[in-house]
Structure formats: C-alpha cells, structure tokens
Amino acid sequence: MRKFDYDLFVIGAGSGGVRASRIAAGHGARVAICEESRVGGTCVIRGCVPKKLLVFASQFAEAFQDCAGYGWQAEAPTFSWPDLIAAKDKEIDRLNKIYLKLLETAGVDLHMGRGRLVDEHTVEVGDKRFSAERILIAVGGRPWVPDIPGREHGITSDEAFDLEDLPRRVLIAGAGYIAVEFAGIFAGLGSEVTLAYRRDLILRGFDDDVRRAVEAGLAGRGIDIRYQVEPARLERSDHGIEVTFSDGSAQVVDQVMFATGREPYVWDLGLENAGVHLGPGNRIEVDEYSRTSAGHIFAVGDVTDRIALTPVALMEGHAFADTEFGGMDRPVEHANTPAAVFSQPPVGTVGLTEAEARDRGHAVRIFRSQFTPMKYTLSDRQEKALMKLVVDADTDRVLGCHVVGPDAPEMLQGFAVAVRAGLTKADFDRTIGIHPTSAEELVTLRQPVAD
Ligand code: NDP
C-alpha cells in the first residue's frame, strides 16, 4: 500500500506551481495542487497579463496623437473604462479556463481552498487533509502598503484592475516596476498622474541612463514626478482623497495607488509545523534546488523572493520537477535574467548595469546611442530612444544590454540569448543589421563613450 496520498502536493496554482505540477505529473508523479483564489495566480489574474492589456489600451492615446503626422485626420476619440475592464475580464476568464484545462489534461488533482501545512507531510485544505511525500510551496506574494494613517483609502495594483471608474486624478506612491507601468496606463487613458517617490530617481536598480530616459518619457507624457516625498496621511473628503506628504505639502486626488513593493505571502501557512525557516523579509529560504530547511519541502517563485518574475518562477518550478521526479540534475540559474518594464517608453534589459559592472571590478567600455525613433519623425514626437551596451574592456564580452524605446521588450529577448551565450562586442559588430529598425543600432555602435 502507498504511504502517501500523493507524490507531490503543490500549494498555490500560479505560474510556478502550475508548471511544477504539470512537469512532475508528466514524469509520472501523482500530483495534487490547491488554490484559494483563481488558478493562474498573480501573473494571469492580477498581474502581467491584465497589466499588458491595459498598457495596450493606453498606448492608443499616443497613436491618436501621432497619426496626424501620417496624414490621418480623426474625430477626437472617446474611451470607456468599463468597456475595457469588461473585455479584460473576459480574456482573463478565458485564460483561467485554459489553466484549469492544462491541470486536468496533465492529470493533476485540483483542490480549491487555502492550503496549510499540518505537519511535515500533511496539507490541510478546508476540512480535508492530504499526505504527500514532497510538498511545493508556490504561494507568491502580496502588495505591501506602508503603515500610514488613512492607508485604507488607498488601493494597490490588485484593486486597480477592477476599479469601477477611471480616476480623474491619481497619486501613485513608489517608483518601481508597478508604479511606472501604472503611471503610463492611467496617463495614457486620460488621468492626471502624480508619482511620489522617496528618493531622487525612478526605477532604482536599473541602469542610470535607462532611469533618466524613462523619467524623461514619463515627464513628456505629463506625469508629475515628485521626488523626496512620500504620502504620510490620507483623509477622505467630499472632494476626494486628501494626501498629506512627508514634507508637509498636500494634494487632493481621486485615487491613491500604493506601488511600494510586494512581500512573500506566508501568512498562516503552518510553516512552523513542518520546520520551514523564513529568511529576511519573510521569504522562504531555499537552496539552488529550491529546497527549504525541511528536506522534502520545496518553494519556488515570489515567496522565495529571488527574482520576482513569472518566467523565473516557471524556470524554478520546472527545474524542481525535473530534478525531483525526472531523474535530472537541474539547479536554478538566475544570472543574466532579462527583464522588461512596460512603462511608456518601455524598457528591455539584460545583464549588468554600468554601475554593477564597475562595482564588480570590470574595466568597462560603454557604447551608447540616443536617437529619435523613425516612427516619431513624421509625427514630430520629441522623444529619444536609448541603446546601451556595457562591455568588458579586457575580454570584449558584452556584460549588459539596455534599451529604452518602442519595442524594447521584444528586442531584448533575442539580445538576452547573445548576452547569456557570452558573446563579445566583436560578435555584435560582425552581425549584419536589419534595416530600417531601431534594433540595428545595437550592432552598429562603433565608438565607446569617452570616460
Ligand atoms: P519594486 O520593488 O519594483 O518597487 C517598489 C517601490 O516602492 C520602489 O520604488 C521602492 O522604493 C518603494 N518602496 C519600498 N518600500 C517603501 C516604503 N517603505 N515607503 C515608500 N516607498 C517604498 O516593487 P513593485 O511593487 O513595483 O513590483 C514588485 C515586483 O514585481 C518587482 O520587483 C518585479 O520583480 C515584479 N514585477 C515585474 C513586472 C515586469 O516584469 N514588467 C511588472 C510588475 C512587477 P526604493 O527604490 O526606495 O526601495
């Protein structure tokens, strides 16, 4: 008789959990997964996917502005937020059903409800208990909101996707991925947007040239960026939400959105019942095989706070399942993970920033180009794209590639292959450009920037 109900029980049916369960089942494991909300997780239900649909919607504003330069004359277009949200919801429902079908086809048992560890091999979901030889925790993260008076009057990205109306005036707190992406969404759709950030330049952690280029793009779209301030108090009044900032200044808006980071969703998981240790910031500590302090319990994705990106969670879940159930040896690899920010203008990036390369002791040659994208010539849009390569001066290896401008995220996927493969600047130079594109600039950067 089998000792456990399942070979693998996965808590959390987001990107990492679903991928791991399907791959493990494909390797012949008996797998179950539980989910307290909707199958698909943050990315599909209230993250990357609906966000990108909203970005598409907001980009039409720019297209309407630019089309006159190309001979189009159009009536002033109107926009309906409720229509957009309804269309977005329909698409998310469709994707949710696809995820459910994927689990069914893979033979994975789905138990709806919150999973909680009862002991080292038992998971409780509602009033049912299941035993499993191995357990995978893939519960993701949740928005984190600073503890200021009146914070309940604000929203996070979770609620932003389901607002009944488009706010006329929005304050966004924070200047990371979510803040700059939503600043562009709201501004494109017609809101007055203020972004308040406690430091002095948005997108900390990105290359400084990238940060300045995006800052210029946001300002050019009318977004009011306020540095060295953060909301200190929110009060609801007849006029909207009155925001008092840390410097004593005040502003009235219709919506305040906190984009002040996310935290691992470890609340009431029963980790202590199974000997799973937490690290700084309440992340679940794991090794390179995603193994926690309890040898047969693993964790992948945002709850481990390694790199909080969907494709990284997919890779971690896949590697775990291959190693534990497929007889392979697949440690996770996070080096040279490409990333995109779907801000307006968007960012695509891979590898080291200039500052990181210097900090790690590389002698670097920097290649940089700023130019008006061809599409903006006839429309007379005053915005420059940025292309930047960080090259090791000793080995000629391209350490980092950073792009801001139209199609940057699409462009970077291919260049990420090159950087990951360890190609040199000479390899880039030998590559023939595709003309006329913006991307060809990356293979025609001849002169390094003077130190
Ligand atoms: P980020 O970590 O990107 O940004 C958080 C922002 O909040 C920073 O500007 C940070 O400031 C600020 N902040 C943090 N703590 C406080 C505080 N106590 N008071 C005031 N401000 C504070 O988090 P996001 O929530 O934007 O996104 C979470 C993660 O989700 C990202 O890191 C990314 O991995 C992922 N994501 C990826 C996307 C993509 O791939 N396109 C899109 C959206 C999210 P400071 O710089 O000073 O720390």
Image (cartoon, helix red, strand yellow):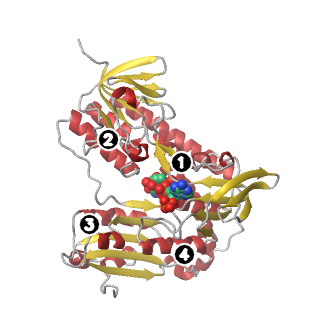
Ligand 1 neighbours mark 1 (CB distance < 8 Å):
yes
Residue at label 3? 418
Task: Name the residue: 53% across, 49% down.
Answer: 50
Residue 144: which numbered mark, if any?
Answer: 1
* SS at circle 1: loop
- Give x and y (percent) for residue 357: 30, 71
Residue 62: which numbered mark, if any?
Answer: none
Image quadrant in which you'd find residue 5: top left
Cα separation, mark 1 vs mark 4, equals 27 Å
Residue at label 4? 216
Image quadrant in which you'd find residue 350: bottom left
Decide which of tag 1 and tag 4 comes sooner along the chain: 1
Decide which of tag 2 and tag 1 comes sooner along the chain: 1
- Give x and y (percent) for residue 92: 53, 42
Q: Is residue 50 above or below residue 378?
A: above
Q: What amino acid type should be assigned to the residue bearing mark 4?
A: Ala
Residue at label 2? 317
Q: Residue furthest right?
A: 238
